[in-house]
């Protein structure tokens, strides 16, 4: 163990005392350490946000400022765009499906693994493995699984003589969003499973013993012990699932690029098409603002609801 000289120790204590003060010398001492982080945050976060807001109030046809169209031309064009409203509805459906599929599967597997006597570590690792695979790779894998002629699902139906159940999972408008969301949820459920397992380990086991003494069934213990004990974890998983659902892009783009007939189009994929395929940067920026406001509204609403149910 190295012992500092008295002079060095006194100097360190004086520095800590100065930086601990709410203002004056403490603030001046902290500024050099804060500047690099603040600069990077401003360069890569605040500046792009400001530029997006500027583009959203720039008329797309002339490249001029707010004077050419009142600054709201791009938003007005979005309001009259039927594809935007379709993408908005499908984004909401996507969020709900991801919450149900990924969150529900993670919860069910957490309950099942926690009840095992042996093999817990193996199953945790096995079910978490899909989460380390990128969404683009997941899209390629599940595209092969959904192949209407050589895919695993339809191939199993053909082998079992259930040809009538075979479907074009990525070509039928009423199935495509469901199919892609299932693939995306397969990639994400492992993280939610581990969070639920950690929450289950924090529940007092004596509560289950008391419930057994009272003659509670497995369903009653789940309802009155497990779910109340996981309330905080459930709200965190739900918020995380909503955030991840809003970022849905890579899997859809690899598998269908929003088709067929825009039936798997989300706000994120439509932003990409507007910005990089149609070169309509003003409308794409306006849609980015709409998506950001949607994320803020969902987050604020969810947090308020969470505070009420506590």
Image: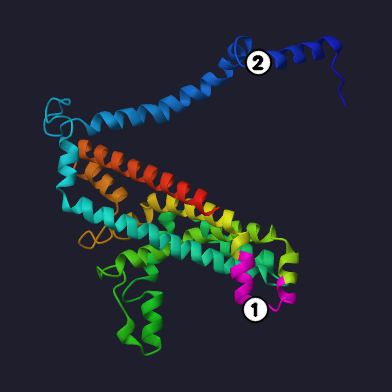
Q: Is residue 204 left or right of residue 186?
A: right
Residue nearest the viewer, comparing 148 with 74: 74
Q: Is residue 215 above or below residue 58?
A: below
Residue nearest the viewer, comparing 106 with 154: 106
Instruction: Give the residue displayed 39% in from the left and 28% down from the top.
Output: 46
Q: Position of residue 254 (x, y in %)?
A: 34, 56
Instruction: Give the residue displayed 57% in from the left and 68% down from the top.
Output: 109
Q: Is residue 135 above or below residue 174?
A: above
- Distance CA(mark 2)–CA(mark 1): 58 Å
Q: Position of residue 87 (x, y in %)?
A: 26, 54
Residue nearest the viewer, comparing 273 with 215: 215
- Which quadrant of the figure has residue 86? bottom left
Q: Is residue 30 above or below residue 141?
A: above
Q: Pointer 2: what residue?
A: 21
Q: Position of residue 18 (x, y in %)?
A: 68, 13
In terms of secondary structure, where does tag 2 sit? loop
Magenta segment:
211-226
Q: Nearer the viewer, mark 2 or mark 1?
A: 1
Residue 121 in magenta? Answer: no
In terms of secondary structure, where does tag 1 sit? loop
Q: Pointer 1: what residue?
A: 217
Q: Position of residue 166 (x, y in %)?
A: 32, 80
Quarter of the image containing the N terminus?
top right
| Residue 132 visible (yes or no) | no
Q: Earlier in the sequence, mark 2 or mark 1?
A: 2
| Residue 80 visible (yes or no) | yes
- Which quadrant of the figure has residue 222? bottom right
Q: Residues within 10 Å of mark 1 (few under 14, many from 20)?
A: few
Residue 224 in magenta? Answer: yes
Residue furthest to the bottom in view is 161
Total numbered badges shown on the rendered structure: 2
């Amino acid at each position: 163990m190295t012992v500092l000289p008295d002079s060095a120790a006194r100097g360190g204590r004086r520095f800590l005392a100065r930086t601990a003060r709410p203002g004056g010398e403490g603030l001046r001492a902290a500024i050099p350490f804060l500047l690099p982080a603040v600069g990077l945050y401003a360069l890569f976060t605040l500046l792009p946000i400001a530029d997006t807001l500027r583009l959203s109030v720039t008329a797309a046809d002339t490249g001029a400022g707010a004077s050419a169209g009142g600054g709201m031309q791009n938003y007005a064009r979005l309001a009259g765009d039927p594809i935007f409203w379709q993408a908005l509805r499908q984004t909401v459906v996507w969020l709900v499906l991801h919450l149900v599929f990924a969150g529900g599967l993670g919860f069910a597997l957490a309950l099942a693994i926690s009840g095992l006597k042996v093999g817990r570590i193996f199953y945790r690792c096995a079910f978490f493995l899909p989460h380390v695979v990128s969404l683009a790779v997941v899209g390629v894998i599940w595209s092969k699984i959904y192949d209407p002629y050589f895919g695993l699902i339809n191939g199993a139906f053909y082998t079992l003589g259930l040809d009538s159940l075979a479907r074009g999972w990525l070509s039928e408008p009423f199935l495509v969003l469901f199919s892609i969301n299932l693939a995306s949820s397969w990639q994400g459920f492992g993280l939610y499973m581990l969070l639920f397992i950690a929450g289950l380990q924090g529940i007092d086991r004596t509560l289950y013993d008391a419930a057994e003494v009272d003659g509670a069934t497995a369903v009653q213990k789940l309802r009155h012990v497990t779910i109340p004990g996981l309330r905080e974890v459930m709200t965190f998983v739900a918020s995380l699932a909503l955030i991840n659902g809003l970022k849905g892009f890579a899997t859809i783009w690899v598998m269908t690029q929003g088709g067929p007939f825009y039936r798997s189009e989300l706000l994120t994929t439509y932003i990409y098409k507007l910005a990089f395929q149609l070169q309509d940067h003003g409308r794409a920026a306006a849609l980015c603002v709409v998506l950001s406001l949607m994320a803020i509204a969902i987050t604020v609403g969810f947090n308020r609801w969470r505070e009420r149910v506590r």
